[in-house]
Structure formats: C-alpha cells, structure tokens
Amino acid sequence: MGQTIAEKILSAHSGTEARAGDLVVAEIDYLMAGDAKGPKALDIFREANLPFRLDPKKTDIIIDHFVPAFDVRWANDHVKLREFASERGVNLFDAGSGVCHTIVTEEGRVGPGDLAVGGDSHVCTYGALNTMAVAVESGETASVFATGKLWFKVPQTIRAEFEGILPEGNLPEGVFAKDLALYLAEEIGLNGANYRAIEYGGPALAALSVESRFTIANMAVDSGAKTGIMEADTKTTEWARAAGREGTPVSPDPDAVYERVIHLDVSSLEPAIAAPPTTDNVFAVGEFTGLPVHQVYVGTCTNGRLEDIEIVARILRSRKIAPGVRFYIAPASRRIQEAAERSGAIRVLNEAGAILLPPSCGPCASMTGNGLVGDGERVLTTANRNFPGRLGSKKAEIYLGSPATAAASAIAGQIADPREILAETAGAAR
Amino acid sequence: MILSGKAFRFGDNVSTDVHLSVKYRSPDTTLQVLMRDAFKDIDPAFSASVRQGDVVVAGENFGLVSSRADAAVVLRELGISCVLARSFGHMFYRNAINMGLPVIECDTDSISAGDKVEVDPETGAIQTGGGEIRFAPYPPSLLKIIAAGGLIPFIQKEGGYPS
C-alpha cells in the first residue's frame, strides 16, 4: 500500500513506516519562532530550565507582527527575543526584514522533503516547496529547543488536483493563485480538512510560478488542515537551489491512499471574493461589484510577493486611488521591496496614492495594531482571514480577493472585477 | 496504566467554545471558574457530578476550533482520566497530550452515558459493559509524556525522547 507525501516525510524523519493515524516522534529540520508566540515559548523554556540542544542553525527568530513596535509590551518582547538569539547563536531577522514565512522560503531555511514546525498558523506556506510544515504551540516550540524532535499524529491526506489549464499555461483572464485558493477553500469548507494534510498536484498547479504556489499552500490551514504539501517539480528544485537548500524532493506513491480527491477545473473560473464571515464563503466577484470599500490592503504571507506587487502596479499605472479609500501595501520582505523598487513598481504605487508600509505583517490581524478599521467600514484585503474583528472593529466587513481584484477595487472605490482594467492594460508598455 | 471511570457522553462537534465558553471568560478568569463552568451549556451538572477517573466520550471533532491549552487543563484538573472520541480538533488533540491528558481516537458509538469504561493506552483496548473496543496503542514515548503529566515535565524528567 503506497504512501502520501506527508506519510513519506514523517517516515523518513521518524525511522518508522508512518501510516495515517500512527503516532510518531520525528526529527525537526527547521523551527520558526516569531514575535507573536515566540516570547511565551522562551518563558516556558526558561521557567522549566530546559537545556538548549537544538542545532542553532535549524531555527530563526523573526520579528514581523508588531512592526514597528507600538506598545511597550511588544518592545519588551522584542528585547527578549533579541537577547535569546544572541545568547544561543540563533539567527535573528529583525523588524523590517519581512513576513516570517516569506523570509523562511526566500532564504533557503527549508527545502523539499524537510519537516518544519513554527509558532504561527501559516507555516503551511512552506508546503509549496514540498516541505511538510506544521504550526505548533509555545510549549512545543520550547520542547523543540530542548530536544530537536516532536511527536506527530500522522495525518490522513486530502488530494487536490488542479486541472483544466488553458493553452500556454495561462489561467483565465483576471484569475490568479488567490482565486484558486479561495475556490478550494470553498470546496473543502472551513474545517473540512481538520487534522488532515492537503496534498496538491495536477497540470494547472504545475503551470503556476512558485510564488503563486505559496499563496495556495498558505491557505491550507484556513480549511483546518495540519499542513499543505505540493509535489516538487523543476520549478521547485530551481527555487530551492537558488535559495540555498536543495533538499530531497518527495513524491507520493501512485497507489497512495487518500481520504478524498478533489478535482478543481480552473478553465472556467472567474475572479473570486470571500465574503464575511468565513474564508469558505466564496463567490464570483460579480456578486459584490459596486459595494463601496474604505480600505484596501495588499500584502501578508498570502499575497505580498513580487508578482503580487507587479500586478498591482500594472493596474495602478497612470491611475489614482479613489478618494475615500486608504490603500495600504506592504512588500512581504525587504528583498521583494528592493526588487519592486528596481522594477519601478514602487514609484507607480506612490504616484497612484498608495500608502507603502515596511516589510512586515502590516494590517493583517487586529493584534498587529496598525491599519485598523472602524465601525461600518468595508475592507478588501489579500490576506487569508475575514472573520469579524480580524482587522479592528467587529462592525467592519472584511472581503478577501486577489491583488488584482484589490487594486481594481481601490481605483473604483468599490469592489470591482479586475478583468476590464486588465484588458485595457494588456497592450500598454510596462 | 489503566484509566477507569464513568462515561460522560457528548455528541459531535463539541467545540472548545462549548466546553470552555468564552462568554464566561475575562482576562482574570481563574482555572477554578473555568472548571466550574465546563460544558455548562450542554450539561449544567457536569462539573458537580464528575469524579476522579471519569471519561469524556464524544463523537466527531471533539475540541474543534480553539488552540487554548486551558481546554485540556480544565478537563485534567476536573479529574477526567481520558477523552474518547471518533475524531478530534487538531489543536485540542495536541494540547491534550502535551498537558498530560490522554485522548484516544476510536469508535465510541457503543458507549452510553454512565457506562463503566476501562481504557488501556498501552495495549489499545477499551473494556465497556458491551464488550471490547480496539484502538492503535500509544507508542512508548507518548506513554511517557502522559505518565510525566505533559510534554515539558516529560523533558524535565527524561531529558528527551528515547533514541
């Protein structure tokens, strides 16, 4: 009986033949500790007087949520994290470096076949690189500092096949990875992947860039999944080699056992919107066009990459953000910001009236404290969560969409279908 | 280690918001208050009638939604010796073992409220009035985590996982 990617990675890291439902203890290749849950992990680690036995090269401290620190509490947490990094010889990505998951994947901290854990829900983003990455609690982070290992229940796997790619590997006009991620979230349902791994493959996935694949893997957890993992191909191995961690790609066996197989035909999709209150409440954008928006945000671990900023710049070129709309954009890393400066995208954003934020989580969760919205306001964001209160007031409405839909809506001052403006820009020189 | 007690029976999708409702919480809510209010919305008599060793038995998705470790601690402190369910919420399952509360995935359909239940995590057997239910036994390292009272006490005591 064959194995899924998750079963194979857990087998290789536990020295067992891991099958769904088994409990195993596995070697951890990488641990991400951030400024949201990291400080509590350090407290537990110190209070329990545990030894630090993890190879310091296998972990990073990343400061990205509370940037710039707007409360003494966060500033003190940051002091604690910096001291720990210095004491233990752990690499520190300090404020302004970017969003943790983007840094980890850009800097070659994980690669194909690796087993990673981290103190943030969206570590599953690494799955685009054929890495199995699982979110852990602060006590578990402390335990990994002490042992380099962690116990796992081997998950069942849901297989998602992206099919129906158009000629020359294109998605339908105006449709991007974010739209695919939202339609898949709708298909699986809010907790439909509880404790499962989602394994992604298919010709339409193969046609996507690695950057686009991060967007899809990122949202695995928003269907309740423990992790999301993609098959590796030459794009994956090229990314991993360039980033500096080649790893060992892991493929599923042809007779692997899946709990469920989902076939998503991308050929007839339209730009998508997830309406409040949940990420699986997904509709074609046409259902909501015309609804006024007050704040638009492009960025986050879901959609703050170079190709996201470039598509926004293409739409905003020679146009202006509508009066009454605050358009925030945060490149997901300093490296991305620099590339967007070189390409001229940043200048286009500034001329259009966008508000550029430092590479960080920015206004993604109200806990980050910046870019909050008030009662009765409506937000369109490229982030991954839209439950009431996520961005401040519980009386605000949060809609999710792609960077193209976000940019088109910022110009229109209302939720807009990006296809019209994309058609206009198609002939224009970049 | 044999875990034995009376079954408290719940259905499917008992989220941590039900067994540890946020509406009874404030920043200074104590563990005692959380224990008193456990399952209040679906079984008001629960916290008064539960005895050391008793077993919570549920259907699908027990402990869905929340990542609050309190949810497992409250049950452990009330004396619950283990939770049996057809399936668990991901974070609840992890938190429970990390806090020293055994959680076991098995077919719970034949267990009724008030049944006497005996669970052996080492052999993977549950004895009930109606017969035996089997489950995948815990591996030795997980048994040690449970015996030590949780993940951190386990590392303090054993120094780490057996190699």
Image: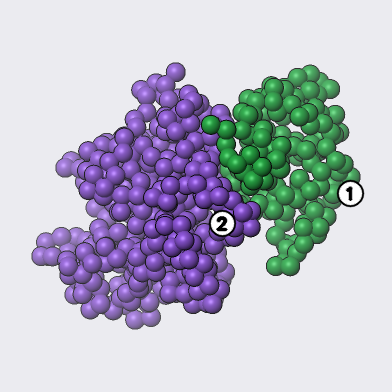
Expressed as whole percent of the image width and height from the top left, the position of residue A168 reads: 16, 42
Residue A66 as seen in the image, left or right of residue B25:
left
State the image quarter where residue A237 is shown. top left
Q: Amino acid at mark 2?
A: Ala
Q: Dividing the image into 4 quarters, which one contains the C terminus of chain A?
A: bottom left
Q: Amino acid at mark 1?
A: Ala
Q: Is residue A347 above or below residue A222?
A: below
Expressed as whole percent of the image width and height from the top left, the position of residue A269 reads: 32, 47
Residue at the image point whose x is 26% and y is 63% from the top: A335
Expressed as whole percent of the image width and height from the top left, the position of residue A23 reads: 57, 31
Residue at the image point whose x is 44% and y is 18% from the top: A1
Residue B48 as seen in the image, left or right of residue B99:
right
Is there a contact, CB below 8 Å, between mark 2 and mark 1? no
Name the chain letter of the residue that bears numbered label 1: B
Residue at the image point whose x is 70% and y is 60% from the top: B22
Mark identifier at residue B48:
1
Residue A354 as seen in the image, left or right of residue A188:
left
Expressed as whole percent of the image width and height from the top left, the position of residue A143 reads: 56, 47
Q: Give the chain letter for purple.
A: A
Residue B131 as seen in the image, left or right of residue A193:
right
Q: Is residue A182 above or below residue A155?
A: below
Label 2, secondary structure: give it: helix
Q: Give the number of the mark in front: 2 or 1.
A: 2
Residue at the image point whose x is 47% and y is 47% from the top: A54
Location of mark 2 (residue): A41
Rendered shade, chain B: green
Q: Is residue A70 above or below residue A231?
A: below
Name the chain letter of the residue that bears numbered label 2: A
Can residue A272 be seen from the camera position used here? no
Q: Residues within 10 Å of mark 2 (few under 14, many from 20)?
A: many
